[in-house]
Image (cartoon, rainbow, N blue to C red):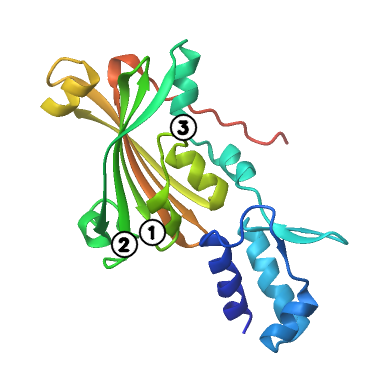
Amino acid sequence: MFKQIERAIRNEIVSGRWPCGHRIPPELQMANAYNAARSTVSKAMARLSEAGLVDRKRRQGTTVASPTEAHEVIGYLDVRQEIERKGRRYNYRVLRSRTIKGRSISESWSSIPSETPVLRLDAVHCGFDNPEVLEERYINLDAAPDALGVNFELETPTTWLLMRLPCTRLRHTIRAAVASVEQAKMLGVPEKSIVLISLRQSWAADVPVTFVKLTFPADQNQFVGEFNPPQA
């Protein structure tokens, strides 16, 4: 029974119906609603808390957790910040937007069910209106149905998604590749230049939310990671 309750609450959070900071009904009230023991509800809430989806505070109740803590730890690459750090005015431009089925992207995004509706965005991150990073993004519309009506040129997909769906799992792969003719032209680099490809998948609990491919000119960018182990 606790799994049923956990799943129901998780769906409310992942769908965005319960946004960050939303106060979740008291355990006793939920126990009555689900015709379950309070200890069963408590177990479900404990699991959601462990997953980072809810914030439980004694005597203050339980609220939907803020995603900012999660992505600070996970370390999202902030393209806008990197461009503005170089002293250039940033803007995000959507080139194409269309809806596809999950099976169309299953080779790259294996965790998305084949019949799931997916929003595909082809976009560019610009400095002074010149493309500096190419973006190919896929958003699970079952998890974020409101994405269809969003103007992502006003709020980038990463920011919009993190404000609504707490990221609890991230897979990030970086590899080198040879730029295609189209990529080289858009980025203003010679044909067959080396580019760096960042592939990122993220989940809210066990629900796949987004897959994004970022393409950077290799001679203009670098990726730096730092690990600070706990002191004995």
Which quadrant of the rendered structure holds the C terminus?
Answer: top right
Residue 17 vs residue 211: left or right? right
Residue at the bottom extreme?
35
Whole-Å distance between the Cαs marked 3 and 2?
Answer: 26 Å
Residue 153, label in figure: none
Q: Amino acid at mark 2?
A: Pro
* 71 vs 208: above or below: above
Amino acid type, callout 1: Leu
Query: Identity of the amino acid at label 3?
Result: Leu
Residue count near mark 1 (Cα–Cα under 10 Å), binned few <14, some 14–19, many ≥20: many
> Which residue is the site of mark 3?
77
Q: Which residue is mark 1?
A: 141
Specify which label sits upstream in the sequence, 1 or 2: 2
Q: Closer to us: mark 3 or mark 1?
A: 1
- Nearest the camera: 91 or 132? 91
Tag 1 near tag 2, CB within 8 Å = yes
Residue bearing mark 2: 117
Residue 180 seen from this side? no
Residue that appears at 45% across and 34% down? 154
